[in-house]
Image: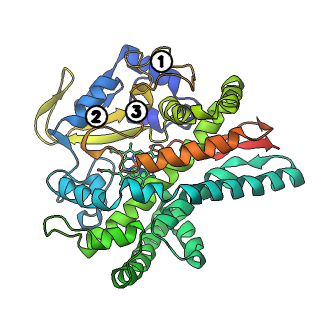
């Protein structure tokens, strides 16, 4: 058996199917680490406890975190602690409302239909289609462009920047030098672009999220320009690859469990539950990290100030304490608690949007006459985000 460790999490062999290993860890060493090594936490209750506990958080502005060395002035509120996190999240939530999300539904329906139509044409002309490139990847970035109401002629720019920034959620030490340079360049160009777009919205506001963000006010408080820009970058990064991988991982789960695909075809109203089940079963974000801000404990283990804790969502979502028969995919199950969107003060702000995209996409995929795997998928190198590079399918 492989002992729980960061090194084991980095092993590309684990990526094919990490769940039997997670299960062993959960059963034999539910919390491991300490003595200078990060704690690895695998049970759902323990993960939730750490995520809710104010004694755990992110490295303060003058420190670098266990996984990320983003300079403090470029850090988004995802990497902040109260009171800064509370203030910024509060302001952004006032603009990122249910109405802003619901307004996107017709566009998501239409884009999904167009992507599937194009993939069907590709399938007719040449056999296997890579579902990741043809369908999963283009939708979320189109949605975020719409969220900011980026002019149609500039959307290819957003796609390119987003692609270069895509590994932004991975630990720095995993990112090769050339990739990191492209990431910085893309971030800078995106910042400059959003700055100009924000100026236009200030003069001429619309119904989109960017107009909301430039106007938002809370008891006289507003977003500074730097805060506005880091928030836009956060929304692009946090909302992009994650949703791509929900579509990819969920489709793979259906392909490997054809009776569940048949069930979704027969009962499209199950799509909401199916999305929760995909998020539980094969979460796009496999883990997050916190550090102890003071001397404390993780479960029964001592955690001196500064020690890191890895909260392994991939393991916690299959904890039999919260989900019966957790290794079985069941799109009709009563949604059980899962941590795919995190927990506590940093719970995903985009969850309603991700759920909406997922529902629309899986309903559309279930309407296809043929959706079958052709050969094996290949995985991306990222370790926090779990997703495929290629998912070859036959569709008709
Ligand atoms: C935070 C997952 C889609 C925006 C998070 C966190 C997780 C997560 C696990 C918490 C990280 C932590 O506590 O360290 C996902 C998944 C998605 C998804 C699995 C898709 C299936 C989106 C979308 C958006 C978004 C579409 C917006 C366009 C955010 C933001 C935060 C966040 C702004 C930071 C919240 C905070 O720090 O208070 N997401 N996300 N996410 N997500 Fe998502």
Q: Is residue 232 above or below residue 225?
A: above
Q: Does label 3 or label 1 sit earlier along the sequence?
A: 1
Where does label 2 land, which residue? 37
Q: Does label 1 or label 2 sit earlier along the sequence?
A: 1
Q: Pointer 3: residues within 10 angstroms few (<14), some, or many (20+)?
A: many
Where does label 1 land, which residue? 1
Residue 389 in sight from this viewpoint: yes
Where does label 3 land, which residue? 313
Residue 349 at x, y percent in the picture = 35, 50
- The residue lying at 54 percent from left, 33 percent from top is 278
- The residue lying at 71 percent from left, 58 percent from top is 114
Depth order, front residue of 41/319: 319
Using residue 200 as the reference point, say whether residue 145 is left or right of it: right
In which quadrant of the rendered image does the C terminus lie?
A: top right
Question: Which labelled disc corresponds to residue 302?
Answer: none
Residue 374 in sight from this viewpoint: no
- The residue lying at 47 percent from left, 71 percent from top is 186
């Amino acid at each position: 058996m492989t002992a729980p460790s960061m090194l084991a999490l980095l092993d590309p062999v684990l990526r094919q199917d990490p769940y039997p290993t997670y299960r062993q860890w959960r059963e034999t060493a539910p919390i491991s680490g300490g003595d200078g090594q990060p704690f690895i936490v695998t049970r759902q209750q323990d993960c939730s406890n750490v995520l809710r506990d104010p004694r755990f958080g992110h490295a303060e502005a003058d420190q670098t975190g266990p996984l990320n060395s983003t300079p403090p002035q470029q850090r988004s509120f995802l990497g902040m602690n109260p009171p800064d996190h509370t203030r910024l999240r509060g302001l952004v939530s006032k603009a990122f409302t249910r109405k802003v999300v619901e307004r996107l539904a017709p566009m998501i329906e239409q884009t999904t239909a167009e992507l599937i139509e194009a993939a069907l044409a590709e399938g007719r002309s040449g056999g296997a289609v890579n579902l990741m490139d043809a369908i999963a990847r283009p939708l979320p970035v189109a949605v975020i462009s719409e969220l900011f109401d980026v002019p149609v002629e500039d959307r290819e720019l957003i796609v390119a920047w987003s692609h270069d920034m895509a590994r932004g959620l991975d630990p720095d030490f995993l990112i090769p030098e050339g990739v990191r340079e492209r990431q910085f360049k893309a971030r800078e160009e995106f910042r400059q672009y959003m700055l100009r777009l924000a100026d236009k919205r200030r003069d001429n506001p619309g119904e989109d999220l960017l107009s909301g963000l430039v106007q938002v006010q809370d008891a006289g408080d507003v977003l500074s320009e730097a805060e506005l820009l880091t928030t836009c970058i956060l929304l692009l990064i946090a909302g992009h690859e994650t949703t791509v991988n929900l579509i990819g991982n969920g489709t793979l789960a259906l392909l490997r469990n054809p009776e569940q695909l048949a069930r979704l075809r027969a009962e499209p109203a199950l799509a909401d539950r199916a999305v929760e089940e995909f998020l539980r079963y094969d979460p796009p974000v496999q883990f997050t990290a916190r550090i102890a801000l003071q001397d404390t404990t993780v479960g029964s283990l001592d955690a001196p100030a500064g020690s890191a804790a890895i909260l392994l969502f991939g393991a916690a979502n299959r904890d039999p304490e919260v989900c019966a028969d957790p290794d079985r995919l069941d799109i009709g199950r009563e949604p059980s608690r899962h941590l795919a969107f995190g927990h506590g003060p940093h719970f995903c702000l985009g969850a309603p949007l991700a759920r909406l995209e997922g529902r629309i996409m899986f309903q559309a995929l279930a309407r296809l006459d043929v959706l079958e795997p052709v050969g094996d998928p290949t995985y991306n190198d990222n370790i926090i985000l779990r997703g495929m590079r290629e998912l070859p399918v036959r569709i008709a």
